[in-house]
């Protein structure tokens, strides 16, 4: 089938020609227009018939209106190029005839125009019609197909074919490309029957002439179809979409837009052409998210938006109140660790990490529901005398993610006896998100703590001046602190150190002789005040190696006898071993002389 297009000469219409059509039949109803020559204005012009289109080999035209004289004929001219030369191929003598068949068995390219021949007075000029050819209407260049409020807006360029009568909009439906509407006098179409939320919609737009000829099905446009999946454990949403195709120079970027909880959309990423996936991270559990993707054409002002996908974030909850609160020495000398956590959550595991030398030992915590918000753990295995103790808090959720609740380091106090008092030094208290406000130093008297002095947080030592003959003296330090909690509130607490004791260095006098019948009638070492020893042993041996006397009572001495029989005057050997309350071990041995 031969089809056509029209090329204007130097004349332009004063009105548009509108030709309605029905299926299978071509009804040509023309509104006659005056055609005005650019150099003759509107007088003394013989109007030509105006070619409408070619349907097959049949040329169709509209009839002119001329009143200057009687009708003679219509003349039809033809050429094989638009520039000519043109030859007269037919003279139509019927004034009401509106078509002519020009057989074209070889389907060659042909161009036509027409003239009117009337018996008009001298000075009247016959002007030619527009030039028409038997080519297809120009192919339509689509500009975009974009999702708009759940519908699809399609837009295209008008092209240069002046005889385009209407535009045919096609959409792929169930695998078939079906005509969905005909558009007159517009270059956009809003498809309210589309379903871009279920998949990508494909569109063609064709030019239609008055004879029913169309341009070709070329360069369709697909809407962007966005799909979103969320990952419970990774707290992310994975976006994927199809490529936008058939822009002349391709896609400049794919822009990702997101709205959270009804707020305005924000662009969160620009991805290069070829990128068809994006991961949106750091979801907030329970928040509502809406996404769409926008493709921006390269070197053009056009863009295409995808469907909108909205999801409520359902992700593994993040502990919001997890915090290590304290670690210190309890009243019975053990380490007590305190913490808080989200008691409404489910934990797959929870542990306190204890730094034991260079090895971290895990102390399992009970995660069996129901949980308590605030909790304590007594560490009975702690070797506190080794120095400050360090603990960390770790929990894991059902996805295996581990969360850190903080680190605490206890205060370790040391007391050293001097000749004129006790030197005290302690390590700083450390706790995640905490600030020490003061240290309090106590003495332990009759089992009760008595405040000795308070220091600022930078002070970690003190000398307690005492007389040289002071008895055993014990101390304990309390660290006062404030800890910032995850919810922004402040927790105030205190942590106690170990108890450290000191006494003057043990001074022992061992007599080198004694006389059972004299003033010093018992052999007894000179010791510190009784009650300051943890263990005591005194032994007396003769020179042959026989044990003559042994006691564990520091107040009991040797009277110079063995089994109630006085031992002869002579030299004997003593052995003394004692342990102070601070753990100091003292051993002495030597000779003594028994005098009679």
Image (cartoon, grey):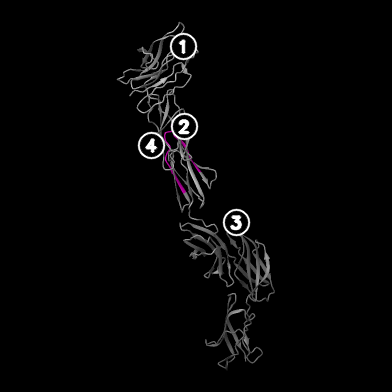
**Sequence-first disc among 3 and 4:** 4
**Sequence-first disc among 1 and 3:** 1
Question: Is residue 415 inside the magenta stretch?
Answer: no
Q: Is residue 499 above or below residue 263?
A: below
Q: Is residue 329 above or below residue 72?
A: below
Q: Secondary structure at mark 2?
A: strand
User: What are the residue bounds of the magenta stretch?
Assistant: 237-257
Comparing 126 with 542, the one in front is 126
Q: Is residue 358 visible?
A: no
Label 4, residues with CA under 10 Å away: few <14, some 14-19, many ≥20:
some
Label 3 vs label 2: CA separation?
55 Å
Residue 201 drawn at (x, y percent) = 41, 38
Check disc 2 and report the residue beneath it: 188
Check disc 4 and report the residue beneath it: 172
The structure residue drawn at horizontal position 38% and vertical position 38%, both measured from the top left corner, is 173
**Sequence-first disc among 2 and 1:** 1
Label 1 vs label 3: CA separation?
91 Å
Check disc 1 and report the residue beneath it: 45
Check disc 3 and report the residue beneath it: 488
């Amino acid at each position: 089938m031969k089809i056509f297009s029209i090329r204007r000469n130097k004349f332009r219409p004063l009105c548009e020609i509108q030709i309605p059509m029905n299926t299978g039949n071509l009804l040509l109803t023309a509104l006659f227009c005056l055609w005005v020559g650019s150099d003759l204005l509107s007088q003394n012009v013989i109007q030509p018939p105006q070619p409408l289109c070619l349907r097959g080999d049949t040329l169709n035209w509209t009839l002119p209106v001329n009143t200057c004289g009687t009708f003679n004929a219509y003349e039809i001219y033809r050429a094989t190029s638009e520039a000519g030369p043109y030859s007269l191929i037919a003279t139509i003598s019927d004034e009401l005839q509106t078509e002519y068949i020009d057989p074209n068995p070889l389907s060659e390219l042909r161009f036509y125009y027409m003239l009117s021949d009337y018996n008009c007075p001298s000075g009247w000029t016959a002007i030619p019609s527009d030039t028409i050819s038997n080519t297809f209407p120009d192919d339509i260049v689509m500009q975009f197909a974009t999702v708009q409020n759940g519908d699809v807006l399609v837009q295209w360029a008008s092209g240069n074919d002046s005889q385009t009568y209407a535009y045919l909009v096609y959409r792929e439906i169930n695998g078939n490309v079906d005509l969905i509407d005909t558009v007159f006098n517009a270059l956009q179409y809003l498809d309210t029957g589309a379903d871009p939320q279920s998949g990508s919609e494909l569109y063609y737009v064709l030019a239609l002439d008055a004879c029913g000829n169309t341009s070709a099905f070329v360069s369709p446009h697909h809407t962007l179809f966005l799909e979103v999946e969320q990952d419970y454990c990774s707290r992310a949403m994975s976006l994927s979409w199809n490529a936008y195709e058939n822009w002349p120079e391709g896609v400049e970027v794919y822009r990702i837009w997101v709205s959270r909880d009804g707020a305005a959309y924000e662009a969160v990423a620009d991805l290069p052409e070829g990128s068809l996936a994006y991961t949106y991270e750091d979801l907030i559990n329970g928040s509502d998210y809406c996404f769409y993707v926008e493709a921006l054409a390269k070197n053009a002002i056009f863009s295409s938006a995808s469907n909108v996908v909205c999801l409520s974030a359902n992700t593994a909850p993040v502990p919001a109140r997890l915090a290590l609160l304290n670690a210190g020495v309890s009243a019975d000398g053990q380490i007590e660790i305190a913490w808080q956590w989200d008691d409404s959550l489910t934990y797959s595991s929870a542990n306190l990490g204890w730094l034991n030398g260079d090895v971290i030992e895990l102390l399992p915590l009970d995660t069996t529901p129901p949980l308590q918000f605030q909790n304590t753990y007594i560490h009975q295995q702690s070797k506190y005398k080794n120095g400050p103790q360090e603990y960390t808090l770790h929990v894991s959720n059902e996805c295996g993610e581990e969360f850190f609740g903080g680190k605490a380091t206890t205060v370790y106090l040391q007391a050293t006896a001097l000749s004129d008092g006790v030197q005290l030094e302690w390590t700083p208290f450390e706790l995640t998100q905490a600030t020490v406000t003061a240290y309090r130093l106590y003495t332990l008297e009759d089992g009760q703590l008595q405040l000795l002095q308070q220091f600022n947080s930078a002070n970690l030592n003190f000398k307690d001046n005492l007389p040289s003959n002071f008895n055993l003296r014990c101390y304990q330090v309390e660290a006062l602190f404030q800890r910032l909690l995850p919810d922004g509130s402040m927790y105030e607490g205190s942590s106690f150190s170990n108890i450290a004791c000191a006494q003057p260095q043990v001074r022992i006098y061992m007599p080198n002789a004694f006389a059972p019948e004299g003033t010093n009638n018992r052999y007894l070492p000179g010791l510190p005040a009784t009650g300051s020893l943890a263990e005591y042993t005194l032994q007396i041996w003769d020179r042959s190696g026989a044990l003559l006397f042994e006691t564990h009572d520091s107040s009991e001495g040797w009277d110079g006898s063995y089994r109630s029989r006085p031992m002869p005057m002579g030299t004997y050997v003593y052995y003394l071993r004692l342990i102070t309350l601070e753990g100091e071990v003292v051993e002495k041995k030597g000779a003594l002389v028994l005098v009679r």
